[in-house]
Amino acid sequence: MNTDEFLCNQPLTRRHVLKMSALGAISLLATSPAKAQAASALPIKRGGALVHADVFNFPSMDPMTGAMSANHLSYTGMFDSLVRLELADPKTGEQKVVPELAESWEFTNPTTLVFKLRKGVTFHDGSPFNAATAAWNFIRMRDHKLARKTVYFVDMEAAEAVDTSTLRIKLKTPNAGFVRNLAYVAGARVPFLSKAAFDKNGDQWLQRNAVGTGPFRFKQWIADDRVLLERFPDYWDTGADGKQLPYLDSVTCRYIPDPSVSMLDLRAGTVHLLESVAAKDAATVKADPNLFLMEQPWAGQGYYCGSFNTEAKPFEDVRVRQAANYAIDRAGMAKTLGHGMATPFAYPFWREGALGFDPSVERYDYNPDKAKQLLRDAGYPNGLDVTLLVIKREPEETIAQFMQQSWATAGIRTKLDIQERLTTLDMVAKKNFQAYFWRGSYWTMVDPDVVKMFIMCGSQNNYGQWCDRDIDKAMNDGAAEQDPKKRDAIYRRAFKTLMDKAYMAHGILLPMMTAYRKELKGLAFNYHMPNLRAAWLDK
C-alpha cells in the first residue's frame, strides 16, 4: 500500500487552521472538536487488544531519563505533549505541527513563546494538568542530571505559568526551529508526567511506573519482555462516534530483538503492528494480502551511523577517521544488505532537501587506496587493528560483518565486540569503545535544530562524545536566525565541519518501514512514530 492509499484509509480526528504571527512564526488554532468519519466509511469498532513489536527494549518508564528518549510507542501512548507532527504532503513528506495539549501558540516576541493549554485534562492518577505542571516538566527536562535531551533546553531561561491554562517559555536567544523540535517525538518533545505522582513517590519510583495524560495508562512492565497498557477512560479527546478515545481496550508493547521472530508473529496474527521492518522482509510484507507496508522515505533509516572515540587511539587522528570513511563500500553495502530498497549514503544526518545540506562538500566515496595512504600518513604503514562495538541483534550483526570485510580492504583489521544493547550504551557512555554504530533517522528533515542532541558538545546522544565548538556555534547561530536562506547557509558550516573532520561514518539509507495487519485501522504517525489514539481493530 502506498502512502496515498494509507492516508485515504485514515479517520480524521480534528480540523486545524494555520495562521502566521507578526514575527513570521507559525501559530496554530484548533477549531471545533467535531470528528469526521473515516474515508473508508467503515463503522468504527471499539474494544480489542492490540499487540505491537519492536527491536528496542525498555530501559525505564521515565521518558525523560530513559535511553529511548521517549522514542517508543509505549511512551507516546502514555504521555501527551504540547504539539505533534502530522503528515501534510505524502509526496514531499512535509509535516505540519498540530495541537495536542496546547490549543494554540505564538511568539509574542523573538524569545518568548506563549502556549494556550487545553482545559479539563487530567493525569491517570486524577490530578489536573495545568500550566504549573507543564512548566515543572519543562524545567525537569532542562535540569535533571539524567535527562537525555538537556541540549535542547540549555537556552531556555524560564518556563512559567501565567495562569492555569497559559504557559510561557522564555528563551535566551531566538530559536526558529523550537516548536517543530517540540513536536517531534524523537526530538525535544516534552512528555508530561504527573507532578503529583512525583511529589508522592519520588524520582526513583518513576523509573518503574508511568503517570501521564495519554490515551493509555500504564498497567505492568515485565522487564526485557513487554509493557502492558490499558485504555484510559477519562482521556480528553473524543472519537468519530462522539465518545472518549481511545477505541482500543489495551496495547501490549513487546520487545522482540530478532526481526525474523516478530515477522512470523505478524504474519500469524499474534502481532498487529511491527516497527523497524528489516529491508529483507519488505517483499514478504508486500506479498502478504493480510499485511500493509507503510514506507516513510522522509524518515529514512541510516544503516551504519557510526561514531569514533576521538579521545583515544587510533581515531584521535582525523586521518584515521577519514581512512575509515574511504574504506566503506557503500554501493556494496546497499546491494548486499538493502534488498533493493537502499541507496549509498555518505552524509551525517543531512539529506537532500534539508536546510544546510551542501552537495558540493566532498564525499568519502569508496577508495581503499586513498584510505591506505591516509593510514600511512598517520603512521600505520601496515594497517592497524581496531574494535567495533556492536549491538547483539539483527541487522546490526550482519552490518558489522560487512563493515569488517569492507575495512579489511584498506588494512583496517576489525574485531567485533558484540554486546546486549543496554551494555553497549553503558560502554559508550563510559567511552569504553573505539568505534560504535547504530541505526537512525535523518532528523534534519524536521529541522536541523533536532540534531543538536547528536552532534553538540556534552550531549548524551553524541555517541562519539567528540566536541567541536565550531559546530556548536553554527548550530546555535542557525537556530537564532529566522530567515530560511540565511539559516541554510549557517547550517552548511556545521555540515561541512562534520564531513571534513570525519567525526562520523555512514553507509546506506533506507525508508523507515512499518508493517501492520489490514484489520488495524485509524493508524496515524508523528513523523515516523505510530500513534494509536484513534486506532481500532476491524475484527
Image (cartoon, rainbow, N blue to C red):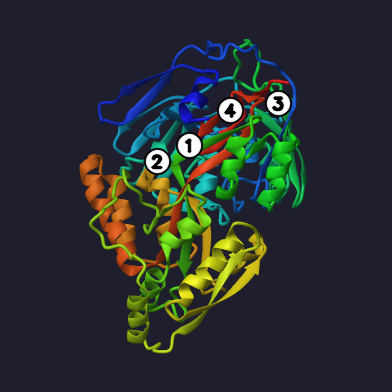
Identity of the residue drawn at 66% across and 67% down? 419
Q: Do labels 2 and 4 touch, CB within 8 Å?
A: no
Q: How far separated are the C-alphas under marks 3 and 1?
A: 24 Å
Pick the front one: 424 or 415: 415
Residue behind mark 2: 446
Residue type beneath disc 3: Phe
Q: In x, y percent, where is residue 438? A: 53, 59
Could you say whether the residue bearing mark 3 is in a helix, strand or loop?
loop
Labelled disc at residue 232: 3
Tag 4 or tag 2, which sits nearer the N-term? 2
Q: Do labels 1 and 2 touch, CB within 8 Å?
A: yes
Residue behind mark 4: 523
Q: In x, y percent, where is residue 142? A: 49, 49
Sort mark 3 into few (<14), some (14-19) or many (20+) by Cα contacts within 10 Å. many
Front label number (2 vs 3)? 2
Above or below, 61 relative to 125 = below
Q: How far separated are the C-alphas under marks 4 and 1?
A: 12 Å
Identity of the residue drawn at 36% across and 51% down? 350
Residue 357 seen by the camera: yes
Residue extending furthest front?
287
Tag 4 or tag 3, which sits nearer the N-term? 3
Pick the front one: 354 or 170: 354
Q: In x, y percent, where is residue 96? A: 40, 29
Q: How far separated are the C-alphas under marks 2 and 4?
A: 21 Å
Tag 3 or tag 2, which sits nearer the N-term? 3
Q: How far separated are the C-alphas under marks 3 and 4?
A: 18 Å
Residue type beneath disc 1: Tyr
Front label number (2 vs 4)? 4
